[in-house]
Structures are given as structure tokens and as C-alpha cells.
Amino acid sequence: MGISQVTEDPSLVRELMAGAGAALLEERRLLRPDELAALAAVPDRSVPALAALAHEVRLAWCGDTVEVEGILSAKTGGCPEDCHFCAQSSRFDTPVKATPFLDTDEVLAAARETAALGATEFCIVLAVRGPDERTLSRILELVPLITEETGLNVAVSSGILGPGQAQRLAEGGTHRYNHNLETARSHFPQIVTTHSWDERWETCQEVKAAGMELCCGVLLGMGESDPQRLELIGQLQELDPDEVPVNFLDPRPGTPLAIRRPVRPLDAIRWIALFRLGLPRTILRYAGGREITLGDLQTMGMTAGINALIVGNYLTTLGRAPQADLNMLADLRMPIGSLSAAI
Ligand code: SF4
């Protein structure tokens, strides 16, 4: 079935879902591209059923634990790259101004706040193309300090890595490295011109080869087509990251994507479910843009395949209060914990 052929026949939709359920829950195999394409085309009224299947798959493959993470923008703005969604690019006239690397005390204070929320992971994020020697040395100073002080696993996001840098980060105690593919290879040139999708892919491979966990996120709502979203799921199946943060575009003033409209809430649920069905064993994390995209459907995402959250603020946008997320998890009776330990 082609993706544009939305089947209106309820019995055919049930058959599609049953086939996907049997593949993922009984045969324990990944879905093929044609199976995912057929599921992507179910009508809106079947999205809750698609979400329910994705939730069942998440429980069967990942357990009921939810991983909570805090992120800190340790060096904000002034980035030379031109990612069209990003308010931190120095090429666009945005309200975000460049600030230098935060002091050690500021980073440790943020890590302590994150630990106090019951989180297990803390990610230091830097707006850079890649780390120069001075930046890498600062990161390597901070990682063991944070671990000693808070017991948190430390993740780092510092762009494209040069020769030997992944190895040094791994040896320095970095638990997970974040480097997003953002979008499908075929759509990437519309979004970024200063580096290539292949450069991102190579850094992801180096992270894995160095023995760190790979966190490789996506950003939906940048004008990509449904087939391109499916292409991205296929590329992630091949890369097999430990974690995929799912971001939705929150159009930032001054960026080339400022005039785009956010993804519709039910479409966001549809694609969360599809990413879970395509990536059954991966940590799927709620990330930026979920508040403006999902509105009242935020809780539904937690029963559509999501099993991790970024709490608090994002890099340049405000998230909702961490307590609102913790209350949501308590209401859903979803335990907070470390997924690496739970699986
Ligand atoms: S997404 Fe990262 S690399 Fe791209 S402009 Fe923003 S900070 Fe720079």
C-alpha cells in the first residue's frame, strides 16, 4: 500500500495493526518499510489504536520505567552553522545572544537541581560546530566532577567530533553522546548547508565505536514529507542508537523556519507511535516543542511509545514546570528510573 492511500476500511486497519503486533510482540522482529508505510496511512480515527499498539510494544521491549533527564545549555548562541530551525545560529537575527561557557559552579548547580528531581541523566549542551581543544578540555574537567557530586550519568552534546575526540570523551567518563540526525538524508540539504548529513552520520558511528551510548534525535515539522519521515525511521533502524529524542519544531523568530506552523497534535501522536513501532528497543524521549505541539495531548504521548522525558527548560525555549511532568508520571503510575538498569 502506498502512503497516500489512506485505508478507510476498518477491518483492513485492524488487520494491519494485528500484523504489526504479531511481528513486534510475538516474532520480535523489526517492521519492514512497507509495513511502516501502511501503518503511517491509517485514518485519524485509528491513531488512538496505533498509539495503544505502540504503548504495548514499548512495555514489551523496554519495560514500564521512564527515564528523566535534565539538559543544560552550557554555551549558548553564536554558532557558525546555519541549521534553519536554530535560534543559536549566528547567521540569523534572533533574540538569542552568544554567551561564553558557564562556570563550573553554574554547571554543578544545574546538575544538582536535575538530580533533586529524581533524574538519572544530565546532558551538557554546547552550541558549536564541534569542540576545539579548549572546549573539549573543559568538558573533560566537568564530566567527572558532575558524576562525583551528583551520581548522575553525564551526557554531552558538542557537535561534530574530530579524530580521536569520541574516544577521549568515552575515556573521560561520558556516558552518552548526543548528536542528532534531525531529519532524513534527502531533506537535510533544505535545512542545513554548512555541514552535511553524512558528517553527522559519521560522528554517530564514531560515538558508537568509542563505546558511548548514542543519543540521536529527530526534529519533526520542518517541511519533510511523510515518506521522508519514514526514510528517517529506516536510517535510525540502521544506526540503532540507544536513544532518540523526538523534537517538534517550535518556530523561532528570526530563523528561516519561523513561519512554519507546528505539527498538528494528532499527527504528532501518530508519528510518536510510528517511531516506537519502527524502533521498538530504543529509548524514545519527549524533547523540545512538545508543549506547543501537543497541548492537551501531552499525556497521550506517554501512552503512544514515549519512555523518557527532558524535564525543565530546553536550550532556548521554556519547558513546562518539572513538577507538572512528575505529576503526569505519578498519575500514569509510571515509575521513574534508569532505563539502562531496567532493561
Ligand atoms: S543546531 Fe547546533 S550546530 Fe546547528 S546552528 Fe544550532 S547550535 Fe549550531
Image (cartoon, rainbow, N blue to C red):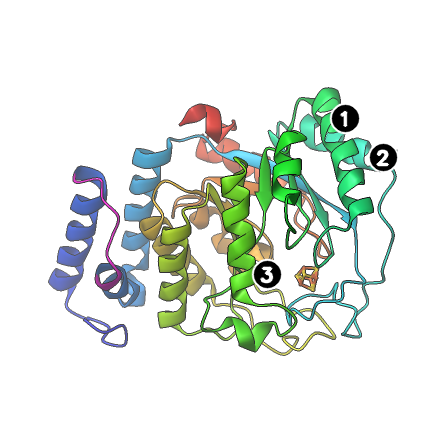
The disc label shown at residue 104, or none: 2
Q: Residue at x 46, y 68 (%)?
A: 185
Above or below, comparing residue 178 to residue 270 in the picture: above
Residue furthest out toward the front: 163
Residue 280 in the image: above or below residue 62 = below
Query: Which residue does the numbered mark 1 point to in the structure image?
Result: 145
Q: Which residue matches tag 3?
A: 292
* Residues packed near mark 3 inside 10 Å, few (<14), some (14 to 19) or many (20 plus): some
- In the displayed structure image, the side of residue 76 where residue 288 appears, left or right: left
The type of residue carrying mark 3 is Ile
State which tag comes first along the sequence, 2 or 3: 2
Residue neighbourhood size for the residue with mark 1, other residues' Cα within 10 Å, grouped as few (<14), some (14–19), many (≥20):
some
Q: Nearer the viewer, residue 180 or 62?
A: 180
Mark number displayed over residue 6: none
Answer left or right for 110 relative to 284: right
Is the residue at mark 3 in contact range of ligand 1, meaning its CB lies under 8 Å from it? Answer: no
* Residue 256 falls within the magenta-colored stretch: no
Which residues are the magenta region? 27-34
* Residue in view at x 66 percent, y 78 percent: 256
* Chief secondary structure of the magenta portion: loop
Is residue 31 a member of the stretch shown in magenta? Answer: yes
Residue 77 in the image: state x and y as whole percent.
79, 60
Q: Position of residue 105 (x, y in %)?
A: 87, 32
| Mark closer to the chain start, 1 or 3 | 1
Measured Cα–Cα span from mark 1 to mark 3: 35 Å
Q: CA distance from mark 2 to mark 3?
A: 32 Å
- Marks 2, 3: nearer the viewer: 2
Tell me the kind of residue under disc 1: Leu
Does the CB distance between marks 1 and 3 fall below 8 Å? Answer: no
